Image (cartoon, rainbow, N blue to C red):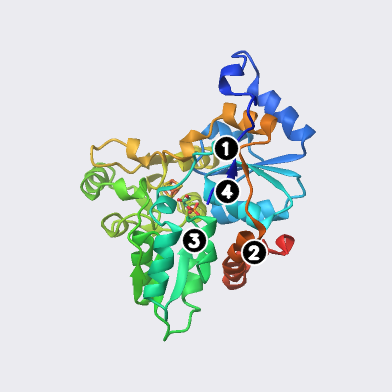
Amino acid sequence: MQTIVLPRDGARTEADLDPTLDLWSEIERLRREKNAVILAHYYQDGEIQDLADFVGDSLDLSRKAASTDADVIAFCGVRFMAEVAKILSPRKTVLLPDAEAGCSLEDACQPEDFRRFREEHPDHIAVTYINCSAEVKTLSDVIVTSSNAEHIIRQLPADKPILFAPDRHLGAYLARQTGREMTLWPGACVVHDRFSERELTKLMVHHPRARVAAHPECPDGILKHADYVGSTHYILEYVLKDPAEEFIIATERHIIHQMEKAAPGKTFIPAPGADGGCSCADCPYMELNTLEKLYLCLVNAAPRVEIPDDVRLRALRPLERMMEMSPPVVQAAVQAAE
Ligand code: 13P
Ligand code: SF4
């Protein structure tokens, strides 16, 4: 199901942009004119993070989207995040700078395949990671993010078997943490799946005092070396609080922008991929969004998220369940969506 409306024929494109245009002040003007709020994920380019009204993880951003009184949300992140903003804030215009900004986890879990998976396991509770399409959400019992998943799974009836989709590494990590048996969907994130254990251990030898912080989308070979495992929000909190001065960061490298701003005296090293470099730590979907495309989406009011009401309401249910079952700090986003 297509949830993105593209710019109409004749809309302005990058080819029409005057290279001398001051994008920062133009975006500022449009933000005021349209009563827009700019939300950015930690994986966006530093320039976008710096001009955003709010930077956060997928859940923080949804809560922000639901609570803002802006008319327009320019969502600098990926499609599933913009869809969640629209599901929670149906009366707002939700823009995504690049319509192709998807996610390998979403791609790996097509709704028809997921429907069959559920039919093959009729007694299971379907716990689905927020990194999936709106349509897959409609087929799920409860949605989780990496910051609330463990807390939610611990509340599920002990006698009920669990299906976890679409990230197999996050699912395996949660199964280990909670002791729950889970049937896992075989998806993975293209960024976290590429970190190399061999190269990481070499790096650790060169930086013996560095702490390792990893996102639970990483394979176990990486997580077992981590001093801390958590969502982007919690990794950021960890490196700021921990007294160590050097950290190896096993998640998408653009989060280091916030770390360096908040703790300029500390050193942050991106975890390496198989070639020993760190190019693997760039999300190819997040990097599609640029300042030019952010400006153009505000001018054209597109690409824009539109979700049919029946789909939106069915996807809202497992998201509401997530909010009800989340720790207090992550409740409250859904009220505005009713
Ligand atoms: P969080 O920011 O919720 O930790 O998610 C990471 C991610 O991969 C988002 O796409
Ligand atoms: Fe998806 Fe991975 Fe990119 Fe996050 S970092 S949007 S999980 S591909």
Please give the residue where the numbered disc 2 appears in the rendered image. Answer: 313
Mark 1 closeness class: few <14, some 14–19, many ≥20 residues within 10 Å? many
Question: Could you tell which of marks 1 and 4 lies nearer the N-terminus?
Answer: 4
State how many labels appear.
Answer: 4
Q: Going by the image, does 322 lie left or right of 88? A: left
Going 41% across and 75% down the picture, which residue do you hit? 162
How far apart are the two marked residues, 2 and 4, measured between alpha carbons? 14 Å
Say whether marks 2 and 3 touch (CB < 8 Å): no
Where residue 241 appears, as percent x and y from the top left, is 50, 53
The disc label shown at residue 213, or none: none
Question: Could you tell which of marks 1 and 2 lies nearer the N-terminus?
Answer: 1
Of the residues shown, which amino acid type is indicated by label 1? Gln
Mark 4 closeness class: few <14, some 14–19, many ≥20 residues within 10 Å? some
* Circle 1: element type: helix
Of the residues shown, which amino acid type is indicated by label 4? Thr
Say whether marks 2 and 4 touch (CB < 8 Å): no
Please give the residue where the numbered disc 1 appears in the rendered image. Answer: 49
Determine the residue located farthest toward the bottom in the rendered image.
Answer: 159
Q: Quadrant of the C terminus?
A: bottom right
Going 48% across and 67% down the picture, which residue do you hit? 149
The disc label shown at residue 3, or none: 4
How far apart are the two marked residues, 2 and 3, measured between alpha carbons? 13 Å
Mark 2 closeness class: few <14, some 14–19, many ≥20 residues within 10 Å? some
How far apart are the two marked residues, 4 and 3, measured between alpha carbons? 13 Å
Question: Could you tell which of marks 1 and 3 lies nearer the N-terminus?
Answer: 1
Q: Quadrant of residue 54?
A: top right
Please give the residue where the numbered disc 3 appears in the rendered image. Answer: 136
Of the residues shown, which amino acid type is indicated by label 2? Leu
How far apart are the two marked residues, 1 and 4, measured between alpha carbons? 25 Å
